[in-house]
Image (cartoon, grey):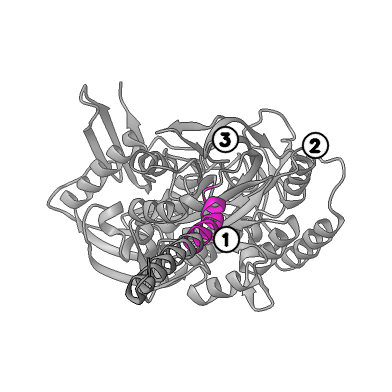
């Protein structure tokens, strides 16, 4: 039977259509396979064991210091970068897949942070961190102490990554990057930097022009969500304090570890909150934390944590290059500041949450120099323990490292009573640095509700008159932008003296070299 042309054409058309469909199906399968390869790679879950070594709040402590808390004489020596480096290298030798992180505040604490190296203040300490082989650090509040331009230069000197995801100047990130992803032992580790929201409460206002801090919880979760598919372990490198780290951990998901700083908390064991580990090492190079983590299934399967004290007498073999650098800068500093100006009869031991003999002494000096009725000083401005013995200019400049100037102000007795009530509340609460006082004394009792009640309050040995006017002395840090936080009111009659606090104390000790200061029980808790 003859086949018509039309039917033949339809048959060819059908055949061609089937071949075309097969070819397109084959191509589609090929493209799906090719595209699935990177997707499979991205979804790959790395497993292995890594170690994170960490420090925080080193405050340019490049030389060893006396361990004043040890009840033996002479006090053993602890800290400094040579001892810290020894412990770092020792742990690296034990644990091959290691990251070294710092949680901020590498500035302010020793005169090294005042020295310019290649035009950068604290450049010498950054140089030492480079030699120790840090992988990353975040920015702390004290990195602003020498101004924004110096901070920018410090970041430029760093041969390690600086990460901070919620800190801006003029709407641009201050840090070169918000996070970094590292690969160690087959494990991809995301490290995100964060700074405290209360930056304006702890830094002089003159250093924070055009600065913005975004909510760390919101920023952290946004970045976590972004990098979670690309990582096996997520570390938040924070500078906000252990209490805020706990709050952060409660409000986020899919992070694994918080390496913290700011509160100088020495956590001998890792905290665990919302399945997130929280660690912190204290301050001033006196501790090195090590957390070794078994990573499985995109989470921490197991871990081992150790907080090591960097005892100087444990050092078996020192880094010669670091030793030379330390000796070089120590010689330069001592050449200018080693002059002995007095003798200290008893140890000065600073503490932000109680009355101290050093706080009593400093406020007495402030009051004597300004001829004020009373003086107050924020305990957080006192930055060093000093053992009994000779006092040098260097000691005082490290004790009082900030460019704080003496100021006076006027207030009523009622306002002063409010400050006293607030100070008692801060002491009982323990979450805020209290004020050290001169020529003021108060007694209080804590009620069943946990709140303090003032039983008596005196100035110059007499009850404070709510209607009277008094002259107070403090530093410009407290008065300029922090008055409500510390005093509880905005005072009138502010007067600048032009006197730098550290210079005033150096001059006073030089004229009165026998320093015998005991805590005078200026605020007394009655049981």
Label 2 sits on residue: 314
Q: Secondary structure at mark 2?
A: helix
Q: Main secondary structure of the magenta part?
A: helix
Q: Nearer the viewer, residue 8 or 96?
A: 8
* For residue 522, side relative to residue 384 (left or right): left
Against 303, residue 141 (above or below) is: below
Q: Position of residue 369 (x, y in %)?
A: 43, 62
At which x and y percent is residue 409? 28, 64
Near mark 1 (Cα within 10 A), the count class, few <14, some 14-19 or many ≥20, is: many
Instruction: State the residue in front, 69 or 262.
Output: 262
Q: What residue is rendered at 60% in x and 70% in y? A: 154
| Mark closer to the chain start, 3 or 2 | 3
Give coordinates of residue 427: x percent, y percent. Answer: 34, 37
- Residue 101 vs residue 245: left or right? right
**Name of the residue lying farthest toward the front:** 1
Per the rendered image, the range of residues in magenta is 27-43
Of residues 413 and 57, which is closer to you in this image? Answer: 57
Sequence-wise, the earlier of marks 1 and 3 is: 1
Q: Is residue 103 visible?
A: no
Query: Neighbour class for label 3 at 10 Å: few (<14), some, many (≥20)?
Result: some
Q: Which residue is mark 1?
A: 107
Is mark 1 in CB contact (under 8 Å) with mark 3? no
Per the image, the residue denoted by label 3 is 296
């Amino acid at each position: 039977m003859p086949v018509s042309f039309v039917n033949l054409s339809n048959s060819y058309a059908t055949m061609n259509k089937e071949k075309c469909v097969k070819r397109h199906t084959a191509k589609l399968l090929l493209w799906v396979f090719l595209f699935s390869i990177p997707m499979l790679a991205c979804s790959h879950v790395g497993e292995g064991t890594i170690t994170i070594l960490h420090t925080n709040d080193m405050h340019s402590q490049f030389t060893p210091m006396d361990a004043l808390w040890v009840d033996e004489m002479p006090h053993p020596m602890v800290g400094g970068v040579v001892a810290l480096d020894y412990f770092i290298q020792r742990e690296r030798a034990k644990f091959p897949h290691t990251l070294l992180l710092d949680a901020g505040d590498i500035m302010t604490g020793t005169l090294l942070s005042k020295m310019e190296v290649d035009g950068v203040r604290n450049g010498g300490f950054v140089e030492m961190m480079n030699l120790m082989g840090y992988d990353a650090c975040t920015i702390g509040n004290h990195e602003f102490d020498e101004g924004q331009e110096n901070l920018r230069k410090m970041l430029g000197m760093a041969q390690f990554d600086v990460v901070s995801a919620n800190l801006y100047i003029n709407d641009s990130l201050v840090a070169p990057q918000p996070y970094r992803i590292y690969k160690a032992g087959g494990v991809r580790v995301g490290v995100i930097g964060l700074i405290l929201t209360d930056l304006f409460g702890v830094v002089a206002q003159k250093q924070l022009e055009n600065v913005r801090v975004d909510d760390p919880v919101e920023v952290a979760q946004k970045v976590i969500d972004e990098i979670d598919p690309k990582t096996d372990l997520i570390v938040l490198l924070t500078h906000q304090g252990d209490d805020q780290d706990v709050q952060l951990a409660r409000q986020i998901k899919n992070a694994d570890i918080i390496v913290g700083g700011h509160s100088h908390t020495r956590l001998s064991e890792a905290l665990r909150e919302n399945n997130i580990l929280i660690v912190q090492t204290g301050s001033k190079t006196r501790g090195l934390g090590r957390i070794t983590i078994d990573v499985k299934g995109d989470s921490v399967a197991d871990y081992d944590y150790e907080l090591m004290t960097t005892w100087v007498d444990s050092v078996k073999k020192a880094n010669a290059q670091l030793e030379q650098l330390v000796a070089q800068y120590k010689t330069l500093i001592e050449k200018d500041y080693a002059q002995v100006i007095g003798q200290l009869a008893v140890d000065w031991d600073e503490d932000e949450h109680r009355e101290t003999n050093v706080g009593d002494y400093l406020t007495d000096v402030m009051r004597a120099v300004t001829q004020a009725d009373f003086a107050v000083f924020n305990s957080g401005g006192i930055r060093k323990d000093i053992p009994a013995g000779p006092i040098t200019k260097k000691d005082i400049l490290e004790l009082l490292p900030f460019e704080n100037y003496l100021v006076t102000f006027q207030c009523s007795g009622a306002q002063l009573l409010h400050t006293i009530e607030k100070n008692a509340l801060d002491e009982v609460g323990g979450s805020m640095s209290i004020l050290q006082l001169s020529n003021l004394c108060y007694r209080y009792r804590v009620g069943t509700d946990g709140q303090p009640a003032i039983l008596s309050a005196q100035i110059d040995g007499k009850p404070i008159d709510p209607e009277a006017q008094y002259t107070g002395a403090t530093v410009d840090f407290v008065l300029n932008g922090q008055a409500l936080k510390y005093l509880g009111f905005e005072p009138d009659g502010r007067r600048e003296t032009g006197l730098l606090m550290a210079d005033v104390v150096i001059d006073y000790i030089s004229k009165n070299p026998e320093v015998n200061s005991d805590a005078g029980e200026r605020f007394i808790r009655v049981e």
